């Protein structure tokens, strides 16, 4: 990979220093910008306007932070749902996707209290995940522990595991 010397102009200065840049840096920068755009768009897309206008800050719907791991014979998904009771979680599965929704803070404002500050809010979580392999919908198991929802989804056809082999370069 060759590096080219490209002029770099600093704000407010004419001309500039010459710095070394990898010609593929442009693509990396474009990838970063696209990821930031997609992340910002998702934040805007999943947030909704609260149903009722109140003095407190109702955030609306948020996509929960999640991890999905492919173990070959099953998918393991962990979803962060802080402050949500297991009774307020809804999980729906089909052979190729899983939908998670949850509500937190369904508390109604109590009249007659002299509030100094009310910062807690109602919050809903919603997210759908498409899965690359068919799962056994009837065998999906979920458990909630310390604000983390763990879902185990056995695959209909497990992915075979292969032993890797080192190839010598000549």
Image (cartoon, helix red, strand yellow):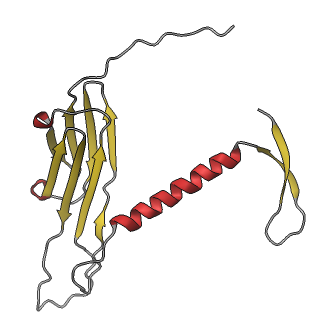
Position of the C terminus by quadrant: top right
Tally of numbered discs: 0
Point 12% across, 53% down: residue: 86
Q: Nearer the viewer, residue 154 or 54?
A: 154
Considering every residue shown, the one lying at the far right of the view is 15
Which of the 4 image quarters holds residue 119?
bottom left
Which of the 4 image quarters holds residue 33?
bottom right
Point 22% across, 42% down: residue: 150
Percent coordinates x, y for residue 26 in the rendering = 69, 49
Q: Nearer the viewer, residue 43 or 87?
A: 43
Percent coordinates x, y for residue 126 in the rendering = 26, 58
Percent coordinates x, y for residue 8 in the rendering = 82, 57
Instruction: Work out whether 136 lies above or below 112.
Output: above
Instruction: Work out whether 130 lies above or below 54.
Output: above
Point 51% across, 60% down: residue: 37
Left or right, 30 with reference to 66: right
Percent coordinates x, y for residue 14 in the rendering = 89, 68
Left or right, 51 with reference to 64: left
Instruction: Work out whether 17 lies above or below 67.
Output: below
Instruction: Work out whether 78 lies above or below 82.
Output: above
Position of the N terminus by quadrant: top right
Which of the 4 image quarters holds residue 60?
bottom left
């Amino acid at each position: 990979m060759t590096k080219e010397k490209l002029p770099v102009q600093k704000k407010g200065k004419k001309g500039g220093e010459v710095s070394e840049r990898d010609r593929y840096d442009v693509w990396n920068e474009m990838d970063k910008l696209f990821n930031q755009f997609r992340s910002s768009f998702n934040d805007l897309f999943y947030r909704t306007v609260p149903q009722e206008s109140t003095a407190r800050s109702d955030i609306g719907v948020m996509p929960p932070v999640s991890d999905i791991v492919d173990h070959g014979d099953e998918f393991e998904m962990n979803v962060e749902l802080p402050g949500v009771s297991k009774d307020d979680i809804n999980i729906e599965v089909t052979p190729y996707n899983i939908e998670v929704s949850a509500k937190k803070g369904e508390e109604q404002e109590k009249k007659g209290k002299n509030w100094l500050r009310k910062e807690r809010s109602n919050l809903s979580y919603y997210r759908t995940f498409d899965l690359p392999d068919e799962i056994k919908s009837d065998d999906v198991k979920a458990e909630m522990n310390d604000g983390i929802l763990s879902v185990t989804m056995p695959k209909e056809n497990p992915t075979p595991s292969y032993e890797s082999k080192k190839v010598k370069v000549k």
